[in-house]
Every structure is written in C-alpha cells, then in structure tokens.
C-alpha cells in the first residue's frame, strides 16, 4: 500500500529559511587578486654544530670500551678548555658491535673483534676557534669528523626581515598587475604565510686517521633565510 506523507506548511517554511540563511551566510567577496611574495635575507653564520666520533676495536669488548672511554674523556676535556658550555655538548651515538668472520667453510661465524663507537656533538659559538678545535679533537683521539654545520644562534631577526621583504614583494607584484590592467587596489582581505625556509645546511665531512699539522681550514660563507606570504587584495573597479 502506498502511503503519502505531507509536512505542515510551517515546517516547509522553516526548511526554506534555513537554506536561505545558509546561502546568505556565505559572504560574497568583491573582485580580488591573490599574489605570492618571497623574501630572502643572506647573512654570515655565527655558530657551527660539530659532530666528532671515536671508534675503537679490540678482541675483547671491555678493552674496546675502555679504550674508547679514555679517548672520549680526553675530547670532553678539550671542548671544556675551549669554552664550550655543558649545555652545548651532547652524546649523539654510543654503540657496541660484534665483528664476525663469515667464511663459507664455517658452520658458525667466528668473532673477530668488538667495535665501540661514540659520537659527540658540540655547538661552537665562536667560529674563530673552530679550526683549532677540530685540530685538537683529531690530535687527541677523534678519528672521525662526521659533520660541521653552519647556522645562526638566533635566526628570529633574520626571519622577520625575510617576512617583511616577502610582504613588500607581494605588494609590488600586486601594484604591477593592477597598473597593467588599469584598475586600482583596495584593502588587503587576507594574509597568510605560505612557508619559510631555515638556513640551508652546509656540511664539511671527512674522516682522518692522522692528526692535521695545522688548524683545519673551514669557511662559513653565507646562509640564506627565505619566507613566502600569500595576499588576497580587493580590486577597485574602474568607473
């Protein structure tokens, strides 16, 4: 049996008002333009992040660990004498690995030795001492320099300059487009940061078995901080 259902007229009216209200709630934007601006700031870094490591091998695990610990303790002494605060030192890797002889004629692999690895990362806030510090670290026990990364101690002021330059770039583009089209610019309707980029990481990596005779030559160069912004700008229609 077919059953027809009807709604009271008041309910239909409420449904229409709800739909109309929803449509009215959607604000209609005036004619507008969306532009993206980019700003960049280049500056010389004022800090380096250095990672050095000590690797030791021995047929006995405890002997390999003892050798490694003695040499690492010497590195801690050197960075302390160089004025590196404890907050700027961090152990980044410590491990013990068994080295096996995997010859095909053996049913069970034979243990050849034990390898101990210990890495230390330090923040060097005075770049004038960086080359000499690397020299001292390698001379006194480090047999790996895994990384030297240049950066800024406080990038916030440079980031703000890049953001300001990004807004200026976006406004300049908007004026150019508006002038070319023969229309005027109205107020900024919306502004959002499209993205920013921290300093590009530059690495100096090497592995040395012997101590260098002089300070290790390093160059910080310049790093670039960039920012992007999106602007939505109203357009004034010609009369």
Image (cartoon, rainbow, N blue to C red):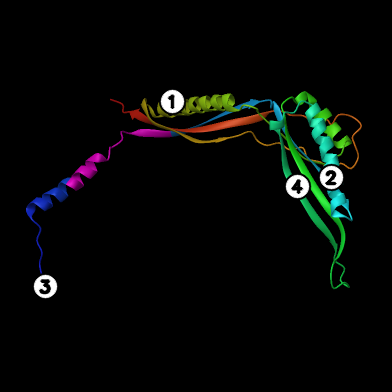
Residue lying at 78% horizontally and 45% vertically, measured from the top left? 118
Q: Residue at x 81, y 27 (%)?
A: 81
Residue 192 in percent (x, y) is at: 44, 34
Outermost residue on the left side: it is 9
Please provide the residue range marked out in magenta.
18-34
Specify the label residue 94 is tagged with. Answer: 4
Image location (x, y in percent) of residue 21 = 20, 43
- Look at 40% across and 28% down and name the residue there: 178
Of labels 4 and 1, the one closer to you: 4
User: Do labels 2 and 1 touch, CB within 8 Å?
Assistant: no
* Disc nearest the viewer among 2 and 1: 2
SS at mark 3 in the image: loop
Badge 3 density bin: few <14, some 14–19, many ≥20, Cα 10 Å:
few
Is there a contact, CB below 8 Å, between mark 2 and mark 4? no
Q: Do the residues labelled 3 and 2 touch (CB within 8 Å)?
A: no
User: Which secondary structure, mark 2?
Assistant: helix
Which residue in the structure is indicated by mark 1? Answer: 175
- Label 1: how many residues lie within 10 Å, few (<14), some (14-19) or many (20+)? some
Camera-nearest label, 1 or 3:
3
* Left or right of residue 237, residue 88 in this image: right
* Mark seen at residue 68: 2
Pointers 1 and 3 in contact (CB under 8 A)? Answer: no
Q: How far apart are marks 4 and 3 (CA)?
A: 79 Å
User: Visible in this render: residue 108?
Assistant: yes
Query: Which callout, 4 or 1, points at the residue further toward the start of the chain?
Result: 4
In the depicted view, which residue is nearer to us: 39 or 46? 46
The residue where tag 3 is placed is: 2
As drawn, the residue found furthest toward the bottom would be 1
């Amino acid at each position: 049996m077919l059953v027809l259902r009807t709604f009271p007229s008041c309910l239909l009216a409420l449904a229409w008002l709800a739909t109309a209200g929803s449509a009215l709630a959607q604000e209609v934007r005036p004619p507008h333009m969306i532009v993206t601006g980019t700003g960049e700031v280049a500056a010389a870094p004022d800090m380096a992040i250095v990672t050095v490591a000590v690797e030791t091998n021995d047929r006995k695990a405890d002997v390999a660990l003892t050798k490694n610990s003695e040499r690492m303790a010497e590195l801690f002494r050197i960075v302390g004498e160089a004025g590196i605060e404890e907050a700027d030192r961090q152990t980044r890797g410590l491990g013990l690995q068994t080295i096996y002889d995997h010859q095909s004629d053996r049913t069970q692999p034979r243990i050849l030795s034990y390898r101990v690895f210990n890495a230390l990362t330090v923040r060097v806030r005075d770049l004038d001492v960086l080359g000499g510090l690397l020299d001292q670290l390698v001379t006194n026990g480090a047999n790996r320099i895994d990384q030297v990364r240049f950066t800024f101690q406080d990038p916030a002021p440079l980031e703000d300059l890049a953001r300001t330059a990004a807004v200026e770039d976006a406004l300049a583009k908007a004026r150019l487009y508006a002038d070319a089209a023969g229309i005027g610019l109205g107020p900024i309707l919306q502004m959002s940061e499209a993205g920013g980029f921290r300093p590009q990481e530059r690495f100096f990596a090497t592995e040395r078995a012997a101590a260098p005779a002089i300070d290790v030559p390093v160059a910080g160069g310049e790093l670039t901080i960039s920012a992007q912004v999106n602007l939505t700008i109203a357009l004034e229609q010609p009369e």
